[in-house]
Amino acid sequence: ETGVTQTPRHLVMGMTNKKSLKCEQHLGHNAMYWYKQSAKKPLELMFVYNFKEQTENNSVPSRFSPECPNSSHLFLHLHTLQPEDSALYLCASSQGLPVVNTEAFFGQGTRLTVV
Amino acid sequence: LAKTTQPISMDSYEGQEVNITCSHNNIATNDYITWYQQFPSQGPRFIIQGYKTKVTNEVASLFIPADRKSSTLSLPRVSLSDTAVYYCLVVGNKLVFGAGTILRVKS
């Protein structure tokens, strides 16, 4: 238990569906992150939020839409995804930014399959 | 953003000490060196972090030479459960992961 909870743990969706991934942390952290990890590939940083404000978008396609209503919650809204978007989506949080001299805590991830 | 280079994979046996070296030639003054561990289908877990010299905690040691252009993660007496991917990160303002080192511990 890392203090970062992601739901659902598994999700299968069609290419025309709309779904959302949820991340919640009770660590009092101010920075939250979304990562994508495709099979046998390194983690790819997608989005970074600090104090609810987006500070980084790593050229992520618009079919992925993040939302951070408060410092404890982070969502990733998904629509019209492609099969190549199938991956493990990981949420993380840290005390704040910059992230030096601190550690990030990761959730267990959501295994997404797009059919 | 400092680039890191580490071995793609390593094999070891139970009870041995494992040392994984990471090179980061263009590390910046404010960067810290951080190591994470990841098991399949789980999120990475922080292992250890350091700025220079040696840092030790209950699971690992981190050795950083004076020039800080490399670092070595040392895992004492590994067990089968230490089989995982180990990531070396040079952390400034971003938390960017490289390919990592796949460590396989055999009995």
Image (cartoon, helix red, strand yellow):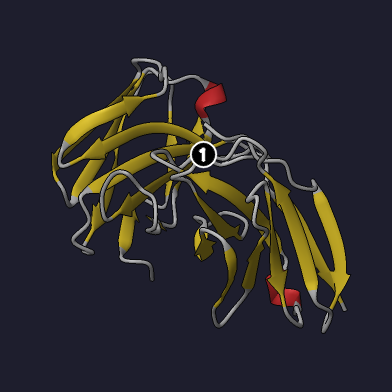
B81 on left or right of A15:
right
Q: Residues within 10 Å of mark 1 (few under 14, many from 20)?
A: some
Residue occupying image coordinates x 24% and y 58%: A25
Foreground: A70 or A88?
A70
Q: Is residue A106 visible?
A: no
Residue B44, given in percent of the width and then of the height, sits at 52, 56
Residue found at the far front of this picture? B66
Foreground: B53 or A20?
B53
Residue B55, given in percent of the width and then of the height, sits at 56, 72
Say if B41 sits above or below B28 in the image. Answer: below
Say if A63 sits above or below B36 in the image. Answer: above
Say if B99 sits above or below A30 in the image. Answer: above
Residue found at the far left of this picture? A70
Q: Is residue A70 visible?
A: yes
Residue occupying image coordinates x 43% and y 42%: B92
Foreground: B72 or A112?
B72
Residue occupying image coordinates x 74% and y 46%: B6
Residue B75, given in percent of the width and then of the height, sits at 71, 73
Residue occupying image coordinates x 56% and y 60%: B52
Kind of residue indicated by mark 1: Ala
- Quarter of the view holding residue B2: top right
- Quarter of the view holding residue B38: bottom right
Which residue is tagged 1?
A: B28
